[in-house]
Amino acid sequence: MNQAEFAVNFFIALFALVDPVGNVPLYAAATDGAPAAARRLTAVYIALFAFVFLSFFYLTGLGLLQFFGISMSAFRIAGGILLLLMGLEMARGDPSHIMDENPTTGVKLSTFADAARRFEGLVVPFGMPLLIGPGAISTAVIYAEEAKRFGVSGVAIGLGVIAGECVLIVAAFWLTSVISRLLGKIGMVIVIRVLGLILCAMAVQFMLTGLAGSTMGLMRHDAVAPYQGIHHLGVGGQPATPGH
């Protein structure tokens, strides 16, 4: 895996877990009745919260594993199980009932005060664990291990990926009304369920890699690292000759 593949894989994994588009209906319900400026500022607060927490676990997660004596293989398997459960819930469930509270009152507040109060109400369960849940934390820690092979540049790429995800959170929440109109209820359900399917596949891959790292010869190499050698094969799956 090179740096570009690492960045793309990490980005896709986090995107499937954080799911800014899929969370648009929940965000719309949670900020219903708020002024447009307060909704936008609340989205920025949520994105900053996500960046701080994901970055914390990305930078310190491996140290926490060492402190508790947990191997990376064990964490991959445990993280894969969590991802699988979350993916199944996304693919089969209906998340629209998770949040229907609206913290509005008759007191008129400034934009900053209104956004701050709404953010306090959204930290749990919207910010955590809905956006930044066990699956996202597990993924950040697992990819932090992958980033070690790239040194400082790997750390920078990972933080850049996290920052990119948070920018998408802000963009999706700012475009709540537009996305909802474009996709409609059926479109939202399709997006959530497709991301759930992708997440389930990633979860199985995490578990296969964890089992391969903790056993001797139990897993096929092409199952643990799929497509790795595909460019080295010629026609009919035979090794390509030099210059071809």
Image: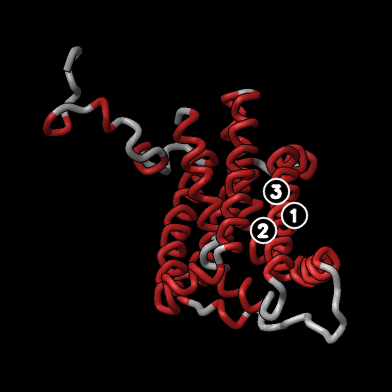
* Numbered label attached to residue 49: 1
Of labels 3 and 2, the one closer to you: 3
Q: Is the residue under label 2 in contact with that under label 3 (CB below 8 Å)?
A: no
How far, Cα to Cα, is label 2 from label 1?
Answer: 9 Å
Q: Residue at x 40, y 71 (%)?
A: 190
Tell which tag, 2 or 1, sits nearer the viewer. 1
Q: Residue 34 at what x, y percent from top left? A: 72, 76
User: Residue sitting at 47 percent across and 37 percent down?
Assistant: 216
Question: Outermost residue, left direction?
Answer: 236
- Percent across and percent down for residue 100 are 66, 83
At a point 37% along the width and 43% down the height, the residue shown is 223
Identify residue type, mark 2. Ile
Residue 207 position, x and y percent, is 50, 51
Sequence-wise first label, 2 or 1: 1
The image shows residue 168 at horizontal and vertical percentages of: 57, 53
Whole-angstrom CA distance, mark 3 to mark 1, is: 5 Å
> Which amino acid type corresponds to the residue marked 1 in the rendered image?
Phe
Q: Tell me the kind of residue under disc 3.
A: Phe
Q: Are marks 2 and 1 in contact (CB under 8 Å)?
A: yes
User: In the shown orientation, is residue 181 left or right of residue 228?
Assistant: right
Confirm whether residue 12 shows in the render: yes
Which residue is more in the foreground, 119 or 16?
119
Whether residue 128 appears in this view of the structure is no
Classify 10 Å Cα crowding around label 2: few (below 14), some (14-19), many (20 and above).
many
Q: Nearer the viewer, residue 224 or 142?
A: 142
Quadrant containing the C terminus in the rendered view: top left
The dot on residue 132 is: 2
Image quadrant where residue 36 sits: bottom right
Which residue lies under the disc numbered 3? 51
